[in-house]
Image (cartoon, rainbow, N blue to C red):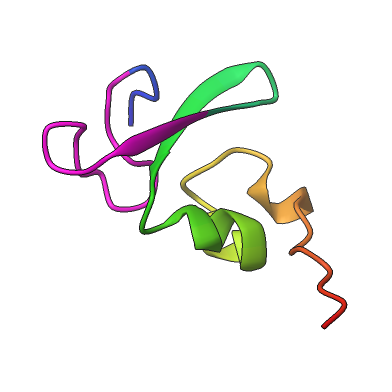
């Protein structure tokens, strides 16, 4: 997968289909759609195999 393209790293939909949010991680620019941004925040393990280094990301610690 070419991360320089305008598509969601999770679902691969393009910016023509959904709003995309640009994020930089390990000097790479990635994009994730607004629907899948919660995965990056709450369950980054789902990005293993899609995002190099995702295995080292911790989910957000909520203090509800």
| Residue at the image position 58 percent from the left and 19 percent from the top | 28
Residue farthest to the bottom?
64
Quadrant containing the C terminus is bottom right
Instruction: Decide: is 9 above or below 28.
Output: below
Give 54 or 14, whichever is nearer the viewer.
Answer: 14
| Residue at the image position 60 percent from the left and 38 percent from the top | 52
Is 15 left, or right, of 24 in this rendering? left
| Residue at the image position 28 percent from the left and 39 percent from the top | 19
| Residue at the image position 49 percent from the left and 53 percent from the top | 37
Is 63 left, or right, of 29 in this rendering? right
Q: Quadrant of residue 12?
A: top left
Residue farthest to the left?
16
Residue farthest to the front?
64
Q: How many marks?
A: 0
Q: Quadrant of residue 17?
A: top left
Instruction: Decide: is 3 above or below 64.
Output: above
Quadrant containing the N terminus is top left
The magenta segment is 5-22
| Magenta span contains residue 60 | no
Q: Quadrant of residue 51?
A: top right
Instruction: Decide: is 21 above or below 33.
Output: above
């Amino acid at each position: 997968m070419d991360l320089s393209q305008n598509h969601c790293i999770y679902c691969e939909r393009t910016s023509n289909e959904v709003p995309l949010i640009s994020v930089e991680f390990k000097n790479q620019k990635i994009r994730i759609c607004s629907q899948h941004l919660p995965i990056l925040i709450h369950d980054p393990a789902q990005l293993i195999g899609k995002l190099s280094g995702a295995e080292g990301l911790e989910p957000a610690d909520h203090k509800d």
